[in-house]
Image (cartoon, grey):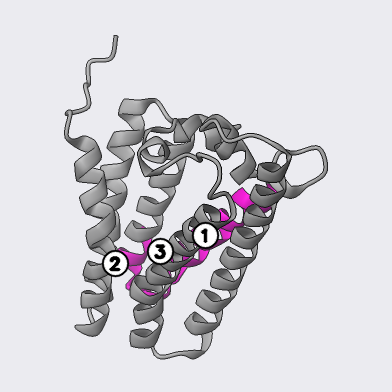
């Protein structure tokens, strides 16, 4: 038995860290203090690292430790370019997460999620494959956008997109897909937000 036990509210702490991170980073960039932004990344990565250790998630531990190491190196070297890598790496990782499931012999990620939530059928399979393709293309575009802004845009503009506008675009795509799904499958019951939130996401994403 582990000597360390995750506090019951740790999920809330992780959620608060996720929501506050882009605000902290953008504020640090506007204040021309990239070291503050890197310190915020260390803090947030540390919170996720503890959560991953408590969950015994090797992938989560590796990801959080890598982000923390990157931020520590950037903090000591004074390299603001270290700020560019996490958002580029995250959108690239999300692109690969969706796109790899579109390869021959693989089940599309959104199809797998829908099946786990009880939504099955040929029409659902066709639709969810298309949604997986849309998310893949979306994150590829975000990766290229973030890279180009890092290379050619002022730091404040890069921060505005990566820490605000891109999050809004993700939310808009999620809501838009949900509205399309409700309209397209209005004569059948599909999984709602409650089932979506209760899913075993670790198992689904690893599968």
Magenta span of residues:
73-100
Residue 34 horizontal/vertical position (percent): 28, 75
Disc 2 on helix, strand or loop?
A: helix
Q: Earlier in the sequence, mark 1 or mark 3?
A: 3
Q: 54 left or right of 173? A: left
Residue 89 is inside the magenta segment: yes
Disc 1 on helix, strand or loop?
A: helix
Q: Is residue 115 above or below residue 143?
A: above
The mark found on residue 22 in the picture is 2
Q: Is residue 83 visible?
A: no
Disc 3 on helix, strand or loop?
A: helix
Q: Earlier in the sequence, mark 2 or mark 3?
A: 2
- Judge depth for marks 2 and 1 and give the one in front: 1
The mark found on residue 150 in the picture is none
Residue 68 horizontal/vertical position (percent): 35, 51
Say which residue label 3 marks.
171
Say which residue label 1 marks.
177
Alpha-carbon span between mark 2 and mark 3: 15 Å
């Amino acid at each position: 038995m582990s000597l360390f036990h995750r506090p019951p509210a740790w999920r809330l702490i992780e959620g608060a860290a996720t929501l506050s991170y882009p605000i902290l980073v953008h504020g640090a960039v506007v204040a021309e203090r990239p070291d503050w932004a890197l310190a915020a990344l260390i803090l947030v990565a540390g919170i996720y690292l503890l959560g991953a250790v408590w969950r015994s998630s090797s992938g989560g531990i590796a990801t959080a430790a890598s982000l923390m190491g990157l931020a520590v190196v950037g903090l000591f070297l004074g390299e603001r370019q270290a700020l560019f890598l996490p958002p580029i790496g995250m959108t690239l990782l999300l692109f690969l997460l969706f796109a790899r499931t579109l390869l021959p012999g693989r089940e599309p990620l959104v199809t797998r999620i829908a099946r786990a939530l009880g939504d099955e059928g040929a029409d659902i399979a066709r639709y969810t494959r298309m949604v997986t393709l849309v998310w893949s293309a979306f994150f590829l575009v975000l990766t290229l956008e973030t890279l180009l802004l890092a290379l050619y845009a002022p730091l404040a503009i890069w921060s505005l997109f990566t820490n605000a506008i891109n999050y809004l675009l993700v939310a808009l795509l999620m809501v838009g897909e949900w509205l399309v799904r409700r309209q397209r499958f209005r004569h059948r019951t599909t999984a709602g937000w409650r089932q979506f939130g209760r899913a075993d996401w670790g198992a689904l994403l690893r599968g």
